[in-house]
Amino acid sequence: MIRVVLPAHLRTLARVDGEVELDVAGQVTQRLVLDALEARYPMLCGTIRDRRTGQRRAFVRFFACEQDLSHEQPDTPLPDAVSSGAEPFLIVGAMAGG
Amino acid sequence: MSGVRVLVGTRKGAFVLKSDGKRERWDVSGPHFAGWEIYHLKGSPADPDRLYASQSTGWFGQLIQRSDDGGETWEPVGNEFGYEGTPGTHTWYDGTPHPWEFARVWHLEPSLNDPDTVYAGVEDAALFRSTNGGKEWQELSGLRGHDSAPSWAPGAGGMCLHSIILDPDQPGRMFAAISAAGVFRSDDEGQTWRPVNHGLKSEGIPDPDAEVGHCVHHIAMHPSRPSVLYMQKHWDVMRSGDSGESWQEVSGNLPTDFGFPIDIHAHEPDTVYVVPIKSDSQHFPPEGKLRVYRSRTGGNEWEPLTNGLPQSNCYVNVLRDAMAVDSLDSCGVYFGTTGGQVYVSADAGDSWAPIVRDLPAVLAVEVQTLS
């Protein structure tokens, strides 16, 4: 079970409270987590990554285990603590705009 | 009983303002989509309960929201705006080629007849259409495919397609206005387009009367006389009597002919409203006095409307999509400001009152007249 924390605006959009729990089979990667998230909540498509290119939106960041994973390749395995559900995968709206 | 529903888009959400035909007491709901920029929202003329809203932020991009119950509840629909084919380039601020990049939806124009058909004007300038209630969007690429498109350049606010007008008399005829390219007309449901800017003169471009390159701020048409168009250009208020084939300046005695919105009285096609703004470097009313100007003669002769509007220390702006009219017997006129006020006049502009004073900066105002 993968735990995902969404930023407030996207929790409102997806109509969820608190963490989202997702089942991801096999080696857990950023791409597979986002695929599962968007499959469960299609209204999030395009809000985290570009719909066509799959590129992370510029003001969105991915954190886990006190690390910034934003610049990792989408198919890089996520930390074991995320794969096991011990730690959440954080999707964060970057601090920008003053 | 008749009434009105005013749809207000702001920098931090949408608000719905409702009143009966007297337009004195108002019910205010919102913010809907709190914290998001709502560039525009508009109701379907064919089904007043069907509303569309453009919701965006720099963080999470573009969403389109749809309501089927007059704004009580909303559902996100399609937000994939992909340019047709290889996007190519337009001209950047420094004159270099710049790839077409989608930024946001500036304007949503529902079909006159079909609640499921809606047009979207976007930045970088292009026109999209959905025929399934906003679920999917297809570019009407004939516009961006016009020979002049590589020369189009952004205005200060970005290269936006901000105005879409559907001709009620000639199915298939539509107008789109782009800042800073000008007005384009299609007579075949948006498949092919040609610029209709003859008569415009813009000193800010190398060739003042060029076919394309004018910073048109807004255009308006009266449904009873669709061959007549009015335009607020960056500078100059213009009128066309021949569906955009030629334009004549009608700025007349306005204190300044810079501004953004322009609209037309619901029952008097020669009665036009503008909000003069001091200049392109000072986006506020002259002398700190917020004045709507009305012409009852199709332009040239203008009178200031001040009753109920602040006449000192007022330095707000009124943006291009932030003025609208209702179609009650005594025509109501509405506008919103960057200071968060939404004003109503229930007597065609003779007197004004604020409906709300402290919203976030207002980006768009549309009105639905309800039976």
Image: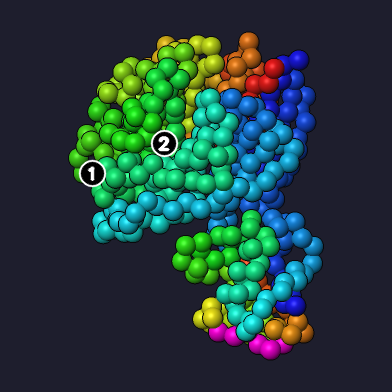
Q: Chain of mark 2?
A: B
Q: Camera-side residue: B196 or B248?
A: B196
B160 versus B273 height, above or below: below
Q: Which residues are magenta?
A: A76-81
Of all residues, the one furthest to the right in this rendering is A17
The residue positioned 56% from the left and 78% from the top of the image is A70
Q: Name the one closer to the observer, B181 or B99.
A: B99
Which three-letter amino acid code belongs to the residue tagged 2?
A: His
Q: CA distance from mark 2 to mark 1?
A: 22 Å
* x then y, percent, for residue B26: 76, 28
* Position of residue B43 measured from the top left corner of the image (x, y, whole percent): 60, 31
* Marks 2 & 1, CB-CB < 8 Å contact: no
Which residue matches tag 1?
B147
**Can you tell which quarter of the image residue A72 is in?**
bottom right
Which label is found at residue B217?
2
User: Could you tell me residue B24's position as x and y percent?
Assistant: 75, 21
- Measuring 63% from the left and 35% from the top, which residue is drawn there? B51
Q: Chain of mark 1?
A: B
In primary-sequence order, the first of circles 2 and 1 is 1
Asked which secondary structure carries label 1, the reply is loop
Q: Does residue B323 belong to the magenta stretch?
A: no
Residue B170 is drawn in which quadrant?
top left
Circle 2 SS class: strand
